[in-house]
Amino acid sequence: MASKKFTRFEKARVIGARALQLSMGAKPMVEVTPDLDPIDIATMELNKKVLPLDVRPREE
């Protein structure tokens, strides 16, 4: 299957899940500064394609 872009709903779900992990103490996969919140860090990880999450397409 070809690589597809996430819909805005998929992006929100993935960023939310990763932000929750980060807020619970998970190690960030990108360089961060103390003024960033977990949502910003999760967005940076998504943009750099280093999310430690396996995202599979939903079977319809």
Image (cartoon, rainbow, N blue to C red):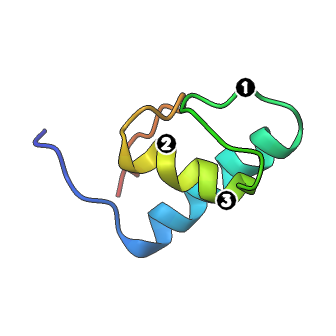
Rendered location of residue 5, percent (x, y) = 24, 58
User: Residue at the spot x=75%, y=55% of the render?
Assistant: 35
Ranked by sequence position, the earlier of labels 1 and 2 is 1
**Is 5 located above or below residue 49 in the figure?**
below
Residue 27: give its label.
1
Q: Quadrant of residue 26?
A: top right
Rendered location of residue 4, percent (x, y) = 20, 53
Assess disc 3: are there few (<14), some (14-19) or many (≥20) residues with their C-alpha within 10 Å of its C-alpha.
some
- Distance, label 3 to label 2, CA atoms, is 10 Å
Q: Are marks 1 and 3 in contact (CB under 8 Å)?
A: no
Secondary structure found at label 3? helix
Identified by mark 1, the residue type is Lys
Identified by mark 3, the residue type is Ile
Which one is nearer the viewer's eye here, 34 or 58? 34
Q: Which residue is mark 2?
A: 45
Assess disc 2: are there few (<14), some (14-19) or many (≥20) residues with their C-alpha within 10 Å of its C-alpha.
some
**Is 2 located above or below residue 38 in the figure?**
above
Rendered location of residue 24, percent (x, y) = 89, 38
Q: Which residue is mark 3?
A: 39
Specify the quadrant that holds the C terminus.
bottom left
Secondary structure found at label 2? helix
Question: Can residue 42 be seen in the rendering of this structure?
Answer: yes
Question: Can residue 57 be seen in the rendering of this structure?
Answer: no
Secondary structure found at label 1? loop
- Distance, label 1 to label 3, CA atoms, is 14 Å
